[in-house]
Image: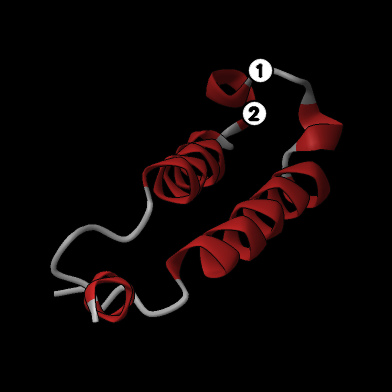
Amino acid sequence: MLRGCKTRPTAVLLSGLMAVAYGMAHGSKGFDPILNGGEAAMLFCFIFLYLFAAGPGAFSVDGLRRRA
């Protein structure tokens, strides 16, 4: 279970990390993630972007701090 402490800053950093990893490891083989084997890096990049946009949730540490 995720605690949700500092979710948004962490999600931004991890999304950027996955974008850089995709560019370094798979970008030279072509742009399409399906053809160059980079679909996992792109998937995690967009999952982290979703977590940044959605936020930590009501039962997270950040959510409990917000209520108090």
Above or below — where is 50 with respect to 59? above
* Tag 1–tag 2 contact (CB < 8 Å): yes
Kindly identify the amino acid type of the residue bearing the numbered disc 2: Asn
Question: As drawn, is 17 to the left or to the right of 57?
Answer: right
Residue in view at x 26 percent, y 69 percent = 63
How many angstroms separate mark 1 from mark 2 (CA)? 6 Å
Spot the residue most to the right. 28
Quarter of the image for residue 58 reads bottom left
Q: 40 or 49: nearer the eye?
A: 49
Q: 59 or 29: nearer the eye?
A: 59
Spot the residue most to the front. 68
Residue in view at x 75 percent, y 20 percent = 31
Question: As drawn, is 35 to the left or to the right of 63?
Answer: right
Above or below — where is 25 with respect to 14? above
Kindly identify the amino acid type of the residue bearing the numbered disc 1: Asp
Residue in view at x 59 percent, y 67 percent = 9
Question: As drawn, is 56 to the left or to the right of 12?
Answer: left
Quadrant (top left, top right, bottom left, bottom right) of the N terminus: bottom left
Percent coordinates x, y for residue 52 in the rendering = 49, 50
Q: Which disc number belongs to residue 36? A: 2
Percent coordinates x, y for residue 48 in the rendering = 47, 50
Q: Secondary structure at mark 2?
A: helix
Q: 60 or 10: nearer the eye?
A: 60
Percent coordinates x, y for residue 2 in the rendering = 22, 74
- Depth-wise, is mark 1 or mark 2 nearer the camera? 1
Quadrant (top left, top right, bottom left, bottom right) of the C terminus: bottom left
Above or below — where is 62 with respect to 41? below
Q: Which disc number belongs to residue 32? A: 1
Q: Secondary structure at mark 1?
A: loop
